[in-house]
Structures are given as C-alpha cells and as structure tokens.
C-alpha cells in the first residue's frame, strides 16, 4: 500500500483533491478535461458553457488550451463563457481589466465567437449595477447554466471576489474589496490610491450551481489557505470552504500548495508511515519532534514516552526505542544547524576547542577565503532576507559578490523619483539637454499628478534603486566592485502582461556565474512573492546552473536559499541557522533603511511604512524564540537557510 488510506484522508480532507508535481502538469490535466468536454458536446452537436477565472492560477491552463487549438485542432466554436468577476469601475481596454486579461490570454487566440464571451461590465453606471447583475445571472440561466467552472483562491480564501463574510446564498453583485485583496493588486495599479475599491462578482450560490467545479492553486504561499479550505470547517470567513458541500468539485494543486495538508505536513496522524510508502528518515524524525515539542509546549529534551504515545507517534518510539533516544536524535539535528561561521572558518586561525562549522559539506568546505555570490531578486532582498549573514561573510574575509537580478524600478513611486529629479535639476550639474528633460518630467508630475510609463522614467527609477542598493551594501561592507546589476529583461513586461523568463535572462545569469565561479551561492527562495519576480529569478538561476553543470566549480559549489519579506522556513526545514547579536540586528536595520523609496512605496500601497525592516526583525526574532523554546541556546535573532547541492536544486526544487 502506498499513500494514506481513503478513510484516513477523509478524517481530514473534506473535498476531493488531486496533487501534481508541478503547476504545468496540473494545468495540462485540467485542460485535457475541458477539451474532452468540449469535444464530446461537439460530437452530439451541443453547446458547452465554461465559467472562467482570472489571475495567475489559470494562465497555464489558458496557454495549454491555446496550444491545443493551434496544434490539435480543438475548436471553441460551441463554447459560451462567463467570467467570474471584474473590477469596478474600469474600462475594458484598461490593461488591468479582466476583459483585457481574457482577450490577451485566451479569447484572441482561439475561435470562440466574441458574442459568446461574457465578462461583467465595469463601465455600467452605479445606478444600473443591480440591474446589470440580475441580467448577468439571467444570461447564465438562458445559456443552460455553467457546465465547468474554473476557480482560483485568494489569500483571504475568496473565490471570485466573494470576500470573507460573503453568504452562501449570494448572487452576482457589487462588492467592496477586502484590504488584503486591494493590497495584493496595488502593485498592478501603481499604488493603493489607484486600486479599485469595488468589483462585480458572481456570488457563492452562482458558483455552486455549476455542474462541475475545479479550483486550482499553485505555490507555497497558497498552502495555508488551501489547508483551511480543504481541512477546516465550512465558514463564510473562507468562502472557498463552501465548495466542500458541492457534489462534483475537485481541488487541483501543485505539491507546494499542498504542503500544509496533514498528508504531507504530519503524515503520522494518518497511520503508520510504512503503510503510506514513507519512512522515518532524519528529516521526518526532525519534523515530528519539532511538531511535538511545539504542540506540547515543551523543550525537545523534556518530551516523554507519554507525549509521543498520546500524539500518535508510537511508531517512532518503536523504531527509536524510547523518548530519550528520539529526543537526542532530534536535538542534535537542530543543534547542528547553528553556526556563527556561515562561510567556514580560516584554518590558519582555528584553535583547538573552537566550535565546529557543521553545515558545510561540499568539497570546497575547507577552502578559505571563499568566493561567495549573494543573489538578490530586488535591490533590497539581500539585506531584508540575510543582511546579518551578509555582514558576517564580509567580516570573516570572504570575497563576497552581490548580484541584483532586476532593477526594482516598478517599486519607486513617482513622488520619490520627483524628489531625486528636482535635486539634480536644482543642483545645476546636469547637461542642458538632460536638465530640460528633467524639468519637463517635474512639470508633468506637478500638472498631471503622475509620470508617464516611459523607458526614460523606468531608467531613472532603476537608477534610484541602484544608488540605494550601493548604500546598503556599503553598510554591510561589500565592495562596490563586487556589486553586479543584471537588470534582467523579465522585469520589463508591459502593463497587464505576464512576466516570462527568456534566453537573455538565462544568458545574463550564466555570464555572472561563469565570471565569479562561486564556492557558495545564496539565493532568495521566497516563492511567496505575490508578483512572481522571485520565482522567475530562481528559475533563471536553475536554468543557468543546468547549462553549466559540467563545470568542476558547479559540482563543488553549495547553494543556500534564504527567505525574503514574505515568509520564513519552517523550523524542521532549516539547514543553516546564523545567530545575530543585537548590534548586528541594528546594522541590518541601517542597511534596510538605505532603501528610502521602499518606505515611501509601503506607505503608498497602504502598508505600515516600517513594514520591511520591522517584518525582517520580527521574523528573525521569532525564529530565535522558537529555537529557545525547543531547548536550544537563546539568541537575539536568527537568519535561516535551506541547503541544496546544485544537482539537488536542479532535480528537486518546485518552481
């Protein structure tokens, strides 16, 4: 028997679930099901009605349907579609509108009759909204109802724009968007003040009346809300949980989005691991011990046989012999992640009795000093995610390089740029032609309240971020000659367009790696980035390493992934924990403060203006408190990393 039994799963999971290794495989599977439905209806000369969603989740699905139309002759001539929602008010030609999204990603590339595509009208007058919504419901009814409804899930657990508190009986209507939903969309609209406060959305009952429903979710940032929707109670606070009551629904997720489910996070609660095709390897033992310690609120070495028995971990006791033996195994694993020498110690200065540098395992572990490359997707991710470790690596004498992968220009507000331009203009140091252009931009902002989205403005904003990165790196001691600004083209997608990785991005990454030939690579592994930049930058690194895998230095290198502003590694995932002193925490804060425009942007987007530095400090302090609660040493703060050998990274990392 492999995998937990159906009966065991049903104790926790209240909705059918399909888990795929990657979002691409999952999207292809859903596309095949939709294609089969379309073709079967065509064979019987019947129409098919699809309910469609927007956002990042269905992009792979739409791309696969377009491919099937072009390469396999899949026709959409008998398809009628109804979209879930639309911002209000908004023009359909606006690149941020959902009508524009659907045209760009599906409708313009297949043979669906334009008159058969329906999206709520974001231009209808406020007085006419209620009538329009009733008419939208009537058009769905006249079409015969939704045969196949595609859904995504928002961070608040919403389906469509049915925000927390939406009743099960709700129909298509105008809604006020949740603050978190608007914050997630603010980057697309150039700040919270420009983000619509309202939307038109199909209601929960409208969705539940579909004959077949598939909810798709990708990535670790969706894991907790997916768990709540699948394993939690049915509640209006998580409208996706209403799907538990539908007879023909399925959640289709990738492995990362399923990561918080009981079957993956705590599989021992479903029965003996051997019966599930699993084993008590070192990683599983550590996960269970950390979970038990936190559940029982006891230090690891204080856990007893009764604690293990009462938590369903008798199997672990049987294999290890006693709580004493299990506790020691877990404690030493955790203890061996801690080191104050993340790059290794100088052998010439090592004395008998010095603490071992435990986590390093590559052939180059004894090399000193090391060439180290820290990759920062945005210009501030390095100091936010690992600023203390960065300072430590420089202080220990390593050759530290920082590669800034994108310019970060999109996160500079017009007002922040205007301050810099006024300084240049008023200083009188600019050439006459440049001064004229600068003066024109300043006048445009003063008269129109916004700057045009031109290449010139983008370059100016990128230069502002570059100067901030230079200042922050100087705080950390990094030489300006070891700072590399790649400005990857993937960042320069047009408004409303999907960012995509291209050969120019891979080539730039290959060139940097080949130039430095690092012994250690630190890269941002924070796939919770809601805008996808971190994911694409990590993908660029993976592809570059794949093309260089025959190089000796690649085989001997180690890769460490840090987390950025959005999440932290789970304690049982951490391979390297670097403790920071109070002085190092303050130095990291000074480095983060160099990114002045990001404090402005956080305020502009509606966030706490201290958000990034405060979030970084809170996260690293919480981790230190977690280690302390497990019975390890007490520190001011800890920065954490997960280790990959390049071959493991190329093989296993879910992107």
Image (spheres, rainbow, N blue to C red):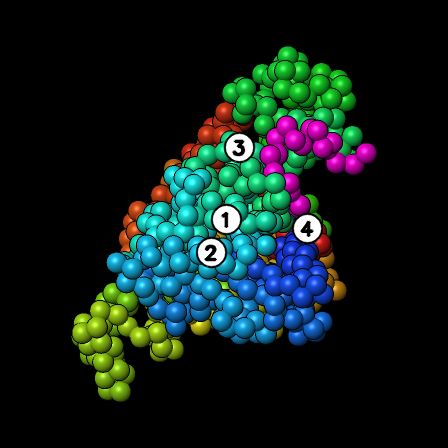
- Give the mark, 1 or 4, whose residue is nearer the N terminus: 4
The total of numbered circles placed on residues is 4
> How far is the residue under mark 1 from the one under mark 4?
28 Å
Sequence-earlier tag: 4 or 3: 4
| Residue density around tag 1, few if under 14, some if 14–19, many if 20 or more, within 10 Å | many
> Quick one: label 2 or label 4, which is nearer the N terminus?
4
Asked if residue 15 is among those painted magenta in the image, a careful observer would answer yes
Task: Identify the residue under disc 2.
Answer: 84
What residue span does the magenta drawing correspond to? Answer: 1-21
Q: Name above or below for residue 531 compared with residue 498.
A: above
Judging by the rendered image, the residue that carries numbered circle 1 is 207
Q: Determine whether, in the image, residue 26 is placed left or right of residue 195.
A: right
Which residue lies most toward the bottom here? 433
Q: Which mark is residue 232?
A: 3
Q: Residues within 10 Å of mark 4 (few under 14, many from 20)?
A: some
Q: Position of residue 653 (x, y in %)?
A: 65, 52
Mark seen at residue 21: 4
Q: Residues within 10 Å of mark 2 (few under 14, many from 20)?
A: many
Indicate whether residue 495 is drawn in magenta: no
The answer to which of 620 and 479 lies nearer the viewer is 620
């Amino acid at each position: 028997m492999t995998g937990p039994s159906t009966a065991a799963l049903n104790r926790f999971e209240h909705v059918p679930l399909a888990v795929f290794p990657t979002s691409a495989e999952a999207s292809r599977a859903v596309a095949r099901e939709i294609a089969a439905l379309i073709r079967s209806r065509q064979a019987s000369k019947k129409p098919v009605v699809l309910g469609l969603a927007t956002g990042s989740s269905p992009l792979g699905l739409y791309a696969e349907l377009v491919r099937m139309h072009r390469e396999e002759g899949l026709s959409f001539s008998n398809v009628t579609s109804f979209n879930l929602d639309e911002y209000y008010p908004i023009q359909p030609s606006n690149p941020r509108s959902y009508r524009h999204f659907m045209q760009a990603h599906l409708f313009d590339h297949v043979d669906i009759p334009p008159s058969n595509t329906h999206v709520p009208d974001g231009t209808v007058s406020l007085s006419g909204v209620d009538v329009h919504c009733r008419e939208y419901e009537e058009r769905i009814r006249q079409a015969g109802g939704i045969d196949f409804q595609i859904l995504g899930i928002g961070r608040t657990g919403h389906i469509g724009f049915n925000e927390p508190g939406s009743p099960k009986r709700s129909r298509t209507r105008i809604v006020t968007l949740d603050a978190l939903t608007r914050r997630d969309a603010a980057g697309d609209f150039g700040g919270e003040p420009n983000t619509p406060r309202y939307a038109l959305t199909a209601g929960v009952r409208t969705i539940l009346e579909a004959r077949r429903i598939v909810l798709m979710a990708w990535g670790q940032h969706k894991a907790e809300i997916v768990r709540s929707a699948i394993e939690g109670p049915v509640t209006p606070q998580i409208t996706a949980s209403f799907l538990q009551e539908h007879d023909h629904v399925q959640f289709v997720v990738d492995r990362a989005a399923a990561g918080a489910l009981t079957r993956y996070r705590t599989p021992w609660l479903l029965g003996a691991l051997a019966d599930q095709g699993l084993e008590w390897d070192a990683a599983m033992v550590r996960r269970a011990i950390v979970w038990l310690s936190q559940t029982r609120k006891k230090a690891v070495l204080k856990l007893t046989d009764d604690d293990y028995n009462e938590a369903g971990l008798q199997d672990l006791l049987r294999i290890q012999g006693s709580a004493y033996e299990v506790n020691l195994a877990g404690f030493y694993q955790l203890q061996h992640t801690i080191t104050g020498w993340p790059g290794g110690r100088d052998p010439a200065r090592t004395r008998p009795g010095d603490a071992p540098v435990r986590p390093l395992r590559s052939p180059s572990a004894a090399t000193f000093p090391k060439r180290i490359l820290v990759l920062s997707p945005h210009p501030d991710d390095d100091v936010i995610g690992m600023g203390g470790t960065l300072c430590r690596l420089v202080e220990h004498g390593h050759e530290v390089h920082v590669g800034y992968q994108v310019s970060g220009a999109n996160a500079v507000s017009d007002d922040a740029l205007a301050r810099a331009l006024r300084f240049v203009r008023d200083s009188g140091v600019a050439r006459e032609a440049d001064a004229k252009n600068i003066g024109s931009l300043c006048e445009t902002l003063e008269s129109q309240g916004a700057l045009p989205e031109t290449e010139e403005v983008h370059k100016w904003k990128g230069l502002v971020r570059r100067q901030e990165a230079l200042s922050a790196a100087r705080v950390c001691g990094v030489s300006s000659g070891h700072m590399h600004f790649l400005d990857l083209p993937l960042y320069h997608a047009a408004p409303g367009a999907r960012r995509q990785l291209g050969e120019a991005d891979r080539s730039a990454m290959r060139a940097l790696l080949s130039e430095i030939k690092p012994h250690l690579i630190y890269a941002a592994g924070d796939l919770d980035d809601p805008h996808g930049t971190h994911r694409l930058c990590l993908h660029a690194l993976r592809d570059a390493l794949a093309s260089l895998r025959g190089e000796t230095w690649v085989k001997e290198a180690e890769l460490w992934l840090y987390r950025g502003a959005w999440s932290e590694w789970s304690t049982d995932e951490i391979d390297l924990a670097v403790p920071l002193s109070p002085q190092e925490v303050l130095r990291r804060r000074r480095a983060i403060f160099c990114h002045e425009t990001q404090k402005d942007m956080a305020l502009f987007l509606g966030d706490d203006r201290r958000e990034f530095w405060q979030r970084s400090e809170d996260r690293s302090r919480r981790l230190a408190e977690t280690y302390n609660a497990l019975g390890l040493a007490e520190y001011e703060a800890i920065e954490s990393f997960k280790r990959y050998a390049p071959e493991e990274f190329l093989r296993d990392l879910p992107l």
